[in-house]
Image: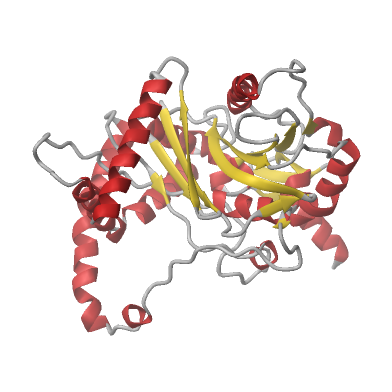
Amino acid sequence: MEDFREERILLEPVSPTGEFLNNSVLSVSILAVLEIEIPITIDISQATSLVCGVLLPINPRFSSIMVEDSNGNKKWQNVEVKFEDHLNFPNFPFGLSPESYDKYLDEYLSKMATEKFPQNKPLWEIHIVKYPTSKAAGNIIFKFHHALGDGYSLMGALLSSLQRAENPSLPLTFPTCQSSKLKRNRSIIHRLPQIFSSILYTIPDFGWSLIKSNFLKDDQSPIRMFMDYASVNEMMKPDSKMPWGNRFAFLHIPIPKFRNDQFSNPLDIVRYAQKVIGRKRKSLSVYLNGRLLEMVKKFKGYEAAAELMYNTVTNASMVISNMIGPVEQMALASHPVKGLYFSLGGTPEDLNISIVSYMGKLSVTFGTKEGHIDLQKFKSCIEQAFDTIFKAAQNS
């Protein structure tokens, strides 16, 4: 039995989504940035102990590389982890102002986002930036290849390395969104209108997704949504309801186009967008898009499926990803975390927006191709929009 388990760990099949996200067409990674409240005193030996004791035991993929067997199928092959290849302490010029280090950090993150992982070592890195910026005394950056898991799984892995700052013995908690038990327990008769509307919405939505994924560049955005977290231990159980994995889905959402006089109240625009997304979520388009990727992979190979995914993202005007962070302040190796944000790297779209909550605050990160947009002007427009909506909400 022991030998069988070892063979399973050494040659675990790569999931279809893992194949889609790590090939010659696509190589997608997630960058999670922890803004540290105090000067960072973690050295290479402490970082190695943390990784060895916490990160690697989470999942065999953190100590594995992708290989192809004799049939051309990709599998995870366990290898020895050389920590010096994964732990980085960048050197910036000494004695600069926090505002100057802001620019150095932005440039460093941009370079990280565009660099592909070497395929001869496990697909993760940790970068410890000890220089103070205008927002933090230091920054710790986790870079994970998306083939290791989806955002839900990788966020769980990251949080397993962290503790509750004021009391490490207590678990971190998260905002929850619970659906009504009354709605879940309704009879099939009462659910018939919902079933019919789901069918009605699915046909145009799925057809629209096919057109947009293959032919037309559009003004739509794939949106990925996540449910409440399970612990890493719970995710690793064979019968877990929320298992570790890499479940990718996309939902095309049209960007509303309004006349200047169409809405007098900014909240009406928010309600309209919510209504559109709610209708889209009632269709089975997300499920069918996922099945389509699996069918393309089965009959044409993972490169063809990756190309379909690439075209889907390229033809969208922007991509929005969102995650839920803890309510309480976290700490990493006794270093309190004052801020948290993440971004995607290696994706072909012109604009990606990443949203995460942490300690009652929302962090929104924008990633753009170089020269695509005036970043300062865009940032000013977004801040003005948020401020307008916030003031309208306060007065409602």
Quadrant showing the C terminus = bottom left
Q: Which residue is the extreme one toward the left?
A: 261
Q: Quadrant of residue 232?
A: bottom right
Taking depth in this image into account, of 60 and 336 the one nearest to the observer is: 336
Taking depth in this image into account, of 320 and 349 the one nearest to the observer is: 320
Q: Quadrant of residue 375?
A: top left
Tell me the residue at 83%/39% (across/down): 42
Taking depth in this image into account, of 283 and 2 the one nearest to the observer is: 283
The colour style of the image is secondary structure
Tally of numbered discs: 0
Tell me the residue at 87%/36% (across/down): 44
Q: Position of residue 282 (x, y in %)?
A: 28, 61
Q: Position of residue 264 (x, y in %)?
A: 13, 44
Q: Position of residue 209 (x, y in %)?
A: 29, 42
Q: Which residue is the extreme one toward the right?
A: 45
Q: Position of residue 295 (x, y in %)?
A: 43, 47
Q: In the image, 159: left or right of 94?
A: left
Does the image show residue 249? yes
The answer to whether residue 246 is above or below residue 25 is below
